[in-house]
Image: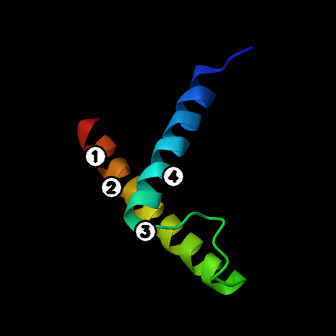
């Protein structure tokens, strides 16, 4: 069984990882960050995502 959505997400992850390695020169296998620093990175990414969701919700409301 193949789920096209899973394949798309997999492709996006691989592409993002490649771009991240080029841009930052490290992968998530890096060992220079502690748990607190990883949690900070995660929180910042989630906050960005929340802003994007809010932006799209506003646009959706305008279109209705």
Labels 2 and 1 touching (C-beta < 8 A):
yes
Which residue is at 49% across, 40% downward?
12
| Dot in front, 4 or 2 | 4
- The secondary element bearing badge 3 is classed as helix
| Dot in front, 1 or 3 | 3
Closer to the camera in the image, 50 or 62: 50
| Dot in front, 4 or 1 | 4
Q: What residue is shown with label 3?
A: 24
Rendered-image quadrant of the C terminus: top left
The reply, left or right, for residue 56 in relation to residue 63 is right
Which residue is at 61% across, 64% downward?
28
Between the residue at mark 1 and the residue at mark 3, the CA separation in whole angstroms equals 33 Å
Query: Which numbered disc covers residue 31?
Result: none
- The secondary element bearing badge 4 is classed as helix
Q: Which mark sits nearer the N-terminus, 4 or 2?
A: 4
Closer to the camera in the image, 34 or 44: 34
Q: Quadrant of residue 2?
A: top right
Q: Which mark sits nearer the N-terminus, 3 or 4?
A: 4
How crowded pointer 1 is (Cα within 10 Å; few <14, some 14-19, many 20+) is rated as: few
Q: Picture coordinates of residue 33 (x, y %)?
A: 63, 82
Q: What residue is shown with label 2?
A: 55
Q: What residue is shown with label 1?
A: 59
Between the residue at mark 3 and the residue at mark 4, the CA separation in whole angstroms equals 10 Å
Q: Is residue 39 above or below residue 29?
A: below
């Amino acid at each position: 069984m193949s789920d096209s959505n899973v394949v798309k997400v997999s492709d996006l992850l691989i592409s993002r990882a490649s771009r991240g390695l080029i841009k930052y020169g490290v992968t998530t296998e890096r060992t220079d960050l502690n748990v607190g620093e990883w949690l900070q990175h995660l929180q910042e990414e989630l906050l960005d995502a929340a802003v994007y969701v809010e932006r799209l919700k506003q646009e959706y409301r305008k279109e209705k």
